[in-house]
Image (cartoon, rainbow, N blue to C red):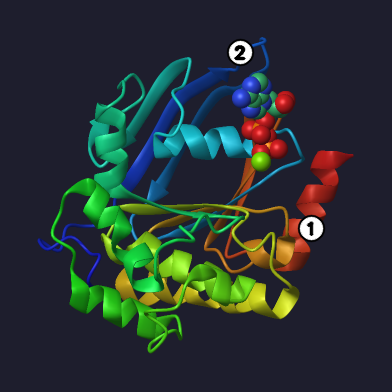
């Protein structure tokens, strides 16, 4: 329950995009009036053909990029038009990330990698929680190891622990299992699922893999920068069928 609202507030969207349009430099309209919300304690997969705007959606929702127009409400405030360094402050306080390429700092130990986001945010690291997270991801006892000494699956599990360490409002993943083999990827997805079920974490994950999307509560489909439908408690087969329709 650690990530849940201490007042036991009812479920609501922790991230809400309203009419978000993003025109990239060069004129590509990557998002075209996207309205979508991500509920507290939910696991959402974002899917769509290559170039449909998935990464742009994630970046705008996470405050890594600013929309051209529209609203992005994260943790109760509109971040769409926030500028640096305020945007970075909001991100550090409320958002966790998992990337395809892990993005761990090679010169730091596992332990320091996990605590880094809190150090950057200037908050007191919660060492007990960090230790529990490392146990959860199966890496207790490896605190002093460097990322380079670990397999890809182990590195991504460190990245998961790091993403959760500051108890963010929401965790965003851009193809977090994209660089992993099937069984390693499955272990990472099972961990994401458990973080949602046991801790009430909110996860938004871009993937192109229907089997990965089937771990989510909901799949949101994108096509040409627009929402092209969604599926609830999806099966891999249903997701694959929808993707076929979208790419036809
Ligand atoms: P996806 O993740 O679904 O493959 P993206 O969000 O990466 O899609 O890209 C959507 C569209 O926006 C594509 O046409 C892509 O080429 C373009 N695009 C993405 N990022 C940039 C950028 N930084 N500058 C210019 N065009 C971009
Ligand atoms: Mg992408």
Q: CA distance from mark 1 to mark 2?
A: 32 Å
Q: Is residue 121 visible?
A: yes
Describe the element under mark 2 as helix, strand or loop.
Answer: loop
Q: Which residue is rendered at x = 26% and y = 61% of the image?
A: 167
Q: Position of residue 193 (x, y in %)?
A: 48, 72
Work out whether 183 lies above or below 79: below
Q: Quadrant of the C terminus?
A: top right
Q: Position of residue 226 (x, y in %)?
A: 63, 29
Q: Quadrant of ligand 1?
A: top right
Q: In which quarter of the view is residue 62 placed?
A: top left
In this figure, which residue is indicated by the disc labeled 2?
25
Nearer the observer: mark 1 or 2; the answer is 2
Q: Which residue is rendered at x = 62% and y = 39% of the image?
A: 54
In this figure, which residue is indicated by the disc labeled 1?
240
Q: In which quarter of the view is residue 109 placed?
A: bottom left
Q: In which quarter of the view is residue 175 placed?
A: bottom right
Q: Which residue is rendered at x = 59% and y = 59% of the image?
A: 176
Work out whether 108 lies above or below 146: above
In the current view of this chain or complex, which residue is farthest to the bottom?
141
Q: Is residue 11 visible?
A: no
Q: Position of residue 213 (x, y in %)?
A: 64, 61
């Amino acid at each position: 329950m650690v990530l849940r609202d201490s007042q036991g507030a009812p479920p609501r969207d922790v991230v809400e995009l309203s009419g978000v349009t993003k025109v990239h430099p060069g004129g590509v309209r990557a998002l075209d009036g996207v309205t979508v919300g991500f509920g507290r304690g939910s696991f959402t997969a974002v899917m769509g053909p290559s170039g449909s705007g998935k990464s742009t959606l994630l970046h705008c929702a996470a405050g890594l990029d600013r929309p051209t127009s529209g609203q992005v409400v994260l943790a109760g405030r509109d971040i769409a038009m926030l500028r640096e360094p305020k945007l970075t402050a909001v991100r550090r306080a409320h958002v966790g990330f998992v990337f395809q390429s892990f993005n761990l700092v090679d010169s730091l130990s596992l332990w320091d990698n996990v605590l880094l986001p809190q150090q950057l945010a200037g908050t007191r690291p919660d060492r007990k929680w960090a230790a529990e997270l490392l146990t959860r991801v199966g890496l207790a006892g490896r605190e002093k190891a460097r990322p380079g000494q670990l397999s890809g699956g182990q590195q991504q599990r460190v990245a998961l622990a790091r993403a959760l360490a500051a108890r963010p409002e929401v965790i965003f993943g851009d193809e977090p299992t994209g660089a992993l083999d099937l069984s390693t990827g499955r272990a990472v997805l099972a961990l994401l699922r458990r973080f949602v079920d046991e801790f009430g974490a909110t996860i938004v994950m871009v993937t192109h893999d229907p089997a990965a999307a089937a771990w989510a509560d909901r799949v949101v489909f994108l096509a040409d920068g627009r929402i092209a439908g969604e599926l609830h408690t999806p099966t891999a087969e249903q997701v694959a069928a929808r993707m076929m329709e979208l790419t036809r």
